[in-house]
Amino acid sequence: MVLSSHDVLQPDLLFVTRAHLAVVRDDHVEGAPDLAVELLSEGSRRRDTLLKRHVYERDGIPWSWIADPEEETVRILRLAPDGYGEAAVFRPRETLRCDFFPGIDEDVAAFFLPQG
């Protein structure tokens, strides 16, 4: 995902709506997708929660989800005029719902492998 000449990032998952398909190229996305998802790991936690969040916020990505397998949470961030605000945090046995994807209705535990 190319956001600027200095910012080339690769989210774990991204989503582009039909309204913004102009950002999709043959082999990359050039511009802000509608949603960027980061799956945290021990090696990526700091980069994903600080650096990438700042860049996504600055470059106008409307939604960012941070999935944390260690805490088994999905944190949903929504861009507002003053930056990202936490729209919701979902935990196991809670049903993940988001205005951006009204069709999603899934227990958060289904997003993570069982521990052990």
Image (cartoon, rainbow, N blue to C red):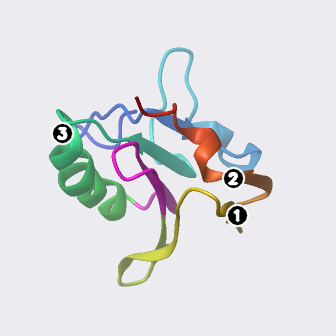
Q: Which quadrant would residue 102 be assigned to in this image?
A: bottom right
Judge by depth and name the residue closer to the eye, 29 or 50: 50
Q: Which residues are magenta?
A: 60-75
Spatial CA distance of label 2 from label 1 is 9 Å
Q: Which one is earlier in the sequence, the residue at label 3 or at label 2?
A: 3
Kindly check if marks 2 and 1 are in contact, taking CB atoms under 8 A apart as contact.
no
Look at the picture and state if 76 lies above or below 56: below
For image coordinates 71% across by 68% down, the residue present is 99
Residue 63: within the magenta?
yes
Is residue 106 at least partly visible in the picture? Answer: yes
**Observer-nearest of 93 and 65:** 93
Identify which amino acid the numbered label 1 is placed on: Arg
**Within the magenta stretch, is there residue 18?**
no
Instruction: Determine whether label 3 and label 2 are within 8 Å by CB.
Output: no
Residue marked by disc 3: 6
The quadrant the N terminus occupies is top left
User: Does residue 110 sit above or below 94 in this rendering?
Assistant: above
Reading the image, the residue beneath label 1 is 97
What is the three-letter code of the residue carrying label 3?
His
At 64% from the left and 63% from the top, the residue drawn is: 94
Q: Position of residue 66 (x, y in %)?
A: 42, 52
Residue type marked 2: Asp
Residue for point 25% across, 54% down: 49
In the image: residue 48, left or right of residue 34: left
Name of the residue lying farthest toward the front? 116
- Mark 1: secondary structure: strand
